[in-house]
Image: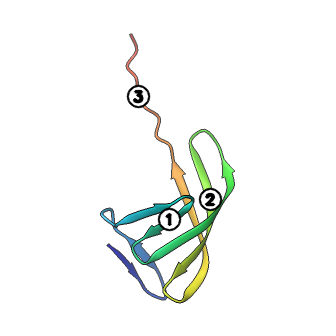
Amino acid sequence: MVSATAEAIDVHKGAHVERDREDVKIGVIRLSRPRVLESDRYQTLMAYDARVGGESGVALCRTIRRRRWVPAG
């Protein structure tokens, strides 16, 4: 579920996500033209052109890569 107000957009864990190449649609939010702002081995910060209804802006998204723990031995 995705809810949006003038103050905030709340994306719940079970939100419906669609991908079309690099574009992403999460509920009522459409993200396009991804640009990597910074990246290291643990995370990537990206900027997207964002549209919600008739409004447009920029969305900042951080992808975190979890390290898998492998027991010694």
Identify the element where label 2 is drawn: strand
Q: Amino acid at mark 3?
A: Trp
Residue of label 3: 69
Q: Tell me which colouring the rendered structure shows.
A: rainbow
Identify the element where label 1 is drawn: strand
Depth order, front residue of 45/18: 18
Q: Are marks 1 and 2 in contact (CB under 8 Å)?
A: no
State which tag comes first along the sequence, 2 or 3.
2
For marks 2 and 3, give the one nearer the viewer: 2
Establish if 31 lies above or below 68: below
Mark 3–mark 1 distance (CA, rounded to whole Å): 30 Å
Depth order, front residue of 4/34: 34
The quarter of the image holding the C terminus is: top left
State which tag comes first along the sequence, 1 or 2.
1
Within 10 angstroms of label 2, few (less than 14), some, or many (20 or more) residues?
some
Q: Amino acid at mark 1?
A: Val
Q: Position of residue 42 (x, y in %)?
A: 56, 41
Residue of label 1: 24
Q: Position of residue 58 (x, y in %)?
A: 62, 74
Q: Are marks 3 and 1 in contact (CB under 8 Å)?
A: no
